[in-house]
Amino acid sequence: MVGDLDAVAILGPLVRDEVLVDNDVNWAARAETASGAGPGDSFVYVHLGEGLGCAAVADGEVYRGHHGVAGEIAHIVTAGLHGEAISFTEVFAQLGLRRRRSTAIDVDALLGSLTTQHPDGRTTAQVLAEALRGVVLATIALTDPDRVVLGGTWGRDARIIDALTAALDAAPRTVPVVRSTHDHSPERAGAAAEALEKLRASITSARTQAVDDQRRT
């Protein structure tokens, strides 16, 4: 379900095969697995854009959770601007980086302020990296990935990746932080890759069935 829209119920009668519905971050993670990762690949995909999201990939499969909402990182408790415990999403309110009357992140303002220094001497990029550090360490502890992939409109920024890498440097347990391989519509790339894989599987299954039928006759 997407709000009140039940896409499976609407589209199901119109197509022959299964209708798959998933969120954009899970599709983006699938795009990463389709970009050369092996079938046993395990990583965490963190989306940083107007919204915040995460997908955990274990043995090449996206873990969706009991209700399909695994990876909701917005409310993970992490370090705020002044070092206090605060939910990740509230860090952006502290920094004045939300859109007016919204919880959505103002990406243009964020990118424009990454080098701005705060009274404690840290830049905005470093403040965000400290908040991200708590989020990423939680995902590492729970999923044991071989890397953390940063995607999204500001997640792929080199200043964010460098600041997060530095923030994680002294952590007792860490993994490499890398930029997403897709910079444009990764969710579409992931959905297309999944559709192609399903089509190939369907054609192979149909051929096998046809051969079996011929043998029986």
Image (tube, rainbow, N blue to C red):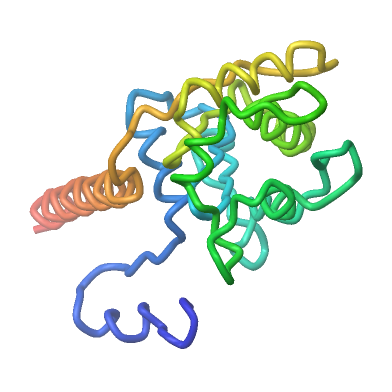
Q: Is residue 199 left or right of residue 151?
A: left
Q: Position of residue 112 (x, y in %)?
A: 48, 36
Residue at the far front: name it: 119
Answer above or below: position of 55 versus 69. above
Please state which of residues 127 and 52 is positioned toward the viewer in this rendering: 127
Q: Is residue 119 left or right of residue 151?
A: right
Q: Position of residue 61 (x, y in %)?
A: 51, 42
Q: Position of residue 42 (x, y in %)?
A: 57, 29
Q: Quadrant of residue 17?
A: bottom left
For image coordinates 28% across by 40% down, the residue present is 184
Q: Position of residue 156 (x, y in %)?
A: 45, 30
Quarter of the image that includes the C terminus: bottom left
For image coordinates 53% across by 22% down, the residue present is 159
Q: Is residue 40 left or right of residue 97?
A: left
For image coordinates 33% across by 33% down, the residue present is 182
Q: Quadrant of residue 8?
A: bottom left
Q: Is residue 203 left or right of residue 135?
A: left
Q: How many marks?
A: 0
Residue at the far right: name it: 84
Answer above or below: position of 23 versus 182. below
Answer above or below: position of 75 versus 126. below
For image coordinates 68% across by 26% down, the residue present is 117
Please state which of residues 17 and 93 is positioned toward the viewer in this rendering: 93
